[in-house]
Image: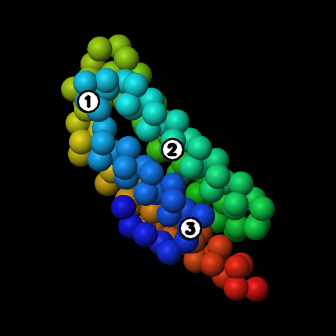
């Protein structure tokens, strides 16, 4: 995943990338649950930073987080009901691209903002 040269965000992004690259399809729901748990922690961390530093784009960013988590939860629920075909395709071909797009379009703005705050 893209590095934003912002350690507050890049550490989580690298961990997410590692989870996706080492995803265990033989224990699909457990691996997917771990990915969702990590994503929730990461998003909560970003949201704390945005509140702490009064980031103006908070609501848009928060809504994007909710959208991604909702989508992930929906695919996990399908997998837990035995319908793993779409969920596995989502992991293989969708979620990584979706998260990368989020980093490029949304997190990059937050990273620039946080870097400007650290220069004060």
| Local secondary structure at mark 1 | helix
Q: Position of residue 60 (x, y in %)?
A: 60, 58
**Residue occupied by mark 3:** 7
**What separation in Å lies between label 2 and label 3 (alpha carbons)?**
16 Å
Q: Residue at x 38, y 67 (%)?
A: 2
Image: 114 above or below 77 = below
Name the mark nearer the viewer: 1 or 2: 1
State left or right for residue 61 relative to residue 103.
right
When asked about the image quadrant of residue 118, the answer is bottom right
When asked about the image quadrant of residue 81, the answer is top left
N-terminal label among 2 and 3:
3
Q: Residue at x 71, y 78 (%)?
A: 117
**Residue occupied by mark 1:** 25
Image: 22 above or below 107 = above
Q: Is residue 12 in sight in this rendering?
A: yes
**What separation in Å lies between label 1 and label 3 (alpha carbons)?**
30 Å
State left or right for residue 66 relative to residue 120.
left
Q: Position of residue 35 (x, y in %)?
A: 44, 38
N-terminal label among 1 and 2:
1
**Category of crowding for the residue at label 2, using alpha-carbon neighbours closer than 10 angstroms: few (below 14), some (14–19), many (at least 20):** many
Q: Nearer the viewer, residue 27 or 65?
A: 27
Q: Position of residue 8 (x, y in %)?
A: 60, 64
Q: What's the mark number on residue 39?
A: 2
Q: Is residue 78 in sight in this rendering?
A: no
Q: Furthest-bottom residue in view?
A: 120
N-terminal label among 1 and 3:
3
């Amino acid at each position: 995943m893209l590095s934003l040269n912002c350690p507050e965000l890049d550490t989580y992004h690298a961990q997410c990338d590692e989870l996706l690259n080492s995803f265990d399809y033989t224990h699909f729901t457990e691996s997917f649950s771990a990915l969702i748990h990590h994503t929730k922690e990461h998003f909560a961390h970003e949201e704390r930073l945005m509140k702490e530093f009064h980031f103006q784009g908070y609501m848009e960013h928060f809504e994007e987080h909710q959208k991604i988590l909702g989508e992930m939860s929906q695919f996990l629920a399908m997998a837990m009901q035995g319908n793993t075909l779409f969920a596995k395709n989502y992991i293989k071909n969708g979620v990584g691209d979706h998260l990368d797009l989020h980093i490029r379009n949304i997190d990059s703005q937050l990273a620039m903002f946080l870097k400007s705050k650290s220069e004060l």
